[in-house]
Image (spheres, rainbow, N blue to C red):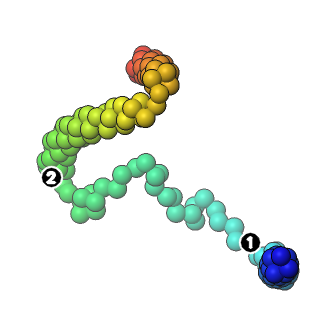
Amino acid sequence: MESVTRTRLLTALVLFVVFGSGVMLGLAADSGLRAEEPDEVPVVTAEEAEPEPPATERRCIYCEVEPNEEELSRIESVIAEHRVRRDSLDREARARYNDARDVILLTTREAIKAVLSPEKAAEYQRLLDAFEAERAAVRENEDDRN
């Protein structure tokens, strides 16, 4: 029994020394970190400042080669065709993803119900039905706003 008490005291002493050292080191480091006023604050006028492009604006790399009007018109038609194809691919991929996700979700829910007692499984299903009804109502409201 004596060795257990001695071990606990030694552990407490080591923890106290470690935490105490951390506090002392923190205080020493903190004393050296004082904010000082800058000697001179540079003032930049609106004319001197370079305007940054908005984050939502896309960069037009082909514009950097300065295409003429005919080239620009043809480039824009290429981009329009690309956009149609890309949007179609996005819709197809999203539909496949949603179908696969729904299968995983349903099998997960069924596996959970298999673990539960019949009463709890019925309550779980009731909660799932209420959750899905609430989600459908939210989606319907969003569709009405759009």
| Nearer to the camera, 100 or 136 | 100
- Res 31 → quadrant: bottom right
Residue at 15 percent across and 52 percent down: it is 71
Residue at 51 percent across and 58 percent down: it is 51
Residue at 32 percent across and 35 percent down: it is 107
Mark 1 residue crowding within 10 angstroms, few (<14) / some (14–19) / many (20+): few
| Nearer to the camera, 121 or 78 | 121
Reading the image, the residue beneath label 2 is 71
* Secondary structure type for disc 1: loop
Is 32 situated above or below 91? below
Q: Position of residue 64 (x, y in %)?
A: 28, 62
Q: Position of residue 125 (x, y in %)?
A: 44, 22
Q: Position of residue 33 (x, y in %)?
A: 80, 79
Taking the image as drawn, is residue 50 in sight?
Answer: yes
Residue type at mark 2: give it.
Glu
Q: Earlier in the sequence, mark 1 or mark 2?
A: 1
Reading the image, the residue beneath label 1 is 41
Residue type at mark 1: give it.
Val
Q: Viewer-nearest of labels 1 and 2?
A: 1
How far apart are the alpha carbons under marks 1 and 2?
48 Å
